[in-house]
Amino acid sequence: MFFDAHLHAGMFPDIGATVGCALNSSIIPVPVGIHLKESQNTLKALENTFPFIPVFVGIHPWYMNDYPFDEKLFNSLLDSPLVKGIGECGLDNKIDVPLEKQIELLELHLEVAMKHDLPVNLHIRGYHGELIRVLKKYRGSVRGVVHNFTFSYEVAKNYLDLGMFLSVGSHIIKPSLKMIRVLNSVGVEHLLIETDADYLHTGEYDPELLKNSYKSLGSILNLSADNIERLIEVNIKNLLRI
């Protein structure tokens, strides 16, 4: 069984069909939210047909101006048995939102995650030092995954020291020599695999993209297909505590 650790299912025209496409290819997708209304739509689309799919709910920093934090709505989403995590949330140095406001929203997510013992799915661009400083305040209280891992081992080690998993995408299908070295330094016990598919930028969901990423990671780490599948499954189940 394969696991897609980061899929924006709620951005596809037909959420159920997208999840069904993954399942038909022996992939369990993990839908992550971009804002609370979208998270709500995802839960409604899946709760009757696919009640076993783990869903993350939250507000991506790109959408925080248009879809602000709504505590009442957030709490209502947490009542769903599908909700197994918080996010996508995080920090981004390329958006027109002051850093202090981004940190404020991030900490709201981290407080919810800590209160409900749920993992967080973290977005980061540029502000690694700031994110690491925030996470250190929650050391031992919040677990999670940093998605779209493309950075150096020196940066990665800070997240690993905080107990975070790192999720890699299709860039590992044709990895740089630097990325090969970094992935071997990190080790499979800290890794997940994702597509980060969102329809707007990726088009229809392509299961082969995830499977090719699995093959490539196995080759990079000198692991058999069976072993890479088994070890990634162990990791994501440890993250989700399922």
Image (cartoon, helix red, strand yellow):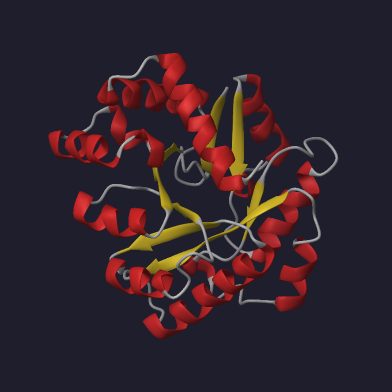
Whether residue 154 appears in this view of the structure is yes
205 left or right, relative to 174: right
Whether residue 152 appears in this view of the structure is no
Q: Position of residue 111 (x, y in %)?
A: 59, 74
Q: Nearer the viewer, residue 185 or 149?
A: 185
Q: Nearer the viewer, residue 210 or 110?
A: 110
* Residue 76 falls in image quadrant: bottom right
Q: Quadrant of the N terminus?
A: top right
Q: What residue appears at the point 56 percent right and 59 percent down from the top-left corner?
A: 87
Q: Nearer the viewer, residue 235 or 172?
A: 235
* Residue 53 falls in image quadrant: top right
230 left or right, relative to 10: left
Q: Nearer the viewer, residue 89 or 190?
A: 190
As drawn, which residue projects farthest toward the front?
Answer: 140
Q: What residue appears at the point 20 percent right and 33 percent down from the top-left corner?
A: 180
Q: Position of residue 125 (x, y in %)?
A: 33, 62
Q: What residue appears at the point 21 percent right and 49 percent down from the top-left corner?
A: 153
Q: How many marks?
A: 0
Q: Position of residue 196 (x, y in %)?
A: 47, 43
Q: Quadrant of the C terminus?
A: top right
33 left or right, relative to 17: left
198 w.r.t. 135: above or below: above
* Residue 41 falls in image quadrant: bottom right
Q: Position of residue 54 (x, y in %)?
A: 67, 44
